[in-house]
Image (spheres, rainbow, N blue to C red):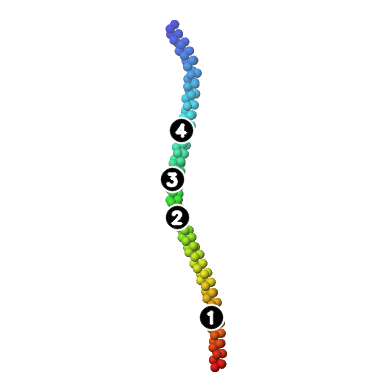
Amino acid sequence: MEKELLLAIKVMLKEELEPIRSDISSIKSTLDEHTRILDKHTKILNEHTKILNEHTSKLDEHSRILDEHTKKLDEHTQILRALEHSAQVNKAEHDIIMNDIAHIKGEIEGLRKDMTNVELITASNWADIAKLKSIK
């Protein structure tokens, strides 16, 4: 009877364990599928990481180049400001010279008028001298 009882327990355990085995098999199958998907995603993630690292390297290089250009631009800006200042100084000096030229021009015109008057007076004096000589 013990054997029959043990056999009955064995059969009963087999029947009870069958759904559990089926569930475990299903879970294992699902886990295997998820592991495969995770492996694919890991591979894709590694590829993206590699691409991202390459882009980061390029971005670092571009940042370095941009920094160099920024320094050059700052230098050019300083040079331009110095040239603008020099141009303003030259413009002020030019304006002073133009003002002086205008004054000199005015004085020359005055001298010309005075010379013309001197010539007229001299001519009149020569005429008077000629008259005086002819009267003698």
Residue 10 vertical placement versus 49 (above, below): above
Residue, disc 2? 78
Asked if marks 4 and 3 touch (Cβ < 8 Å), the reply is no
Mark 3 or mark 2: whose residue is earlier in sequence: 3
Mark 4 or mark 1: whose residue is earlier in sequence: 4
Residue 104 tag number: none
Q: Secondary structure at mark 4?
A: helix
Q: What residue do we see at 49% from left, 21% from top?
A: 23
Residue 60 tag number: 3
Q: Secondary structure at mark 2?
A: helix
Q: Residues within 10 Å of mark 1 (few under 14, many from 20)?
A: few
Residue 39 tag number: 4
Mark 1 or mark 2: whose residue is earlier in sequence: 2
Q: Quadrant of the N terminus?
A: top left
Count of numbered marks: 4
Residue 40 in the image, given as x and y percentages of width and height: 47, 34
Please tell me whether mark 4 or mark 1 is closer to you in this view.
Answer: 1
Mark 1 or mark 3: whose residue is earlier in sequence: 3
Query: Disc 1 marks which amino acid?
Result: Val
Residue 16 in the image, given as x and y percentages of width and height: 49, 15
Please tell me whether mark 2 or mark 4 is closer to you in this view.
Answer: 2
From the viewer's side, name the closer residue of 4 and 43.
43
- For marks 4 and 3, give the CA distance: 31 Å
Query: Disc 2 marks which amino acid?
Result: Gln
- For marks 1 and 2, give the CA distance: 59 Å
Residue, disc 1? 118
Residue 131 in the image, given as x and y percentages of width and height: 56, 90
Q: Quadrant of the C terminus?
A: bottom right
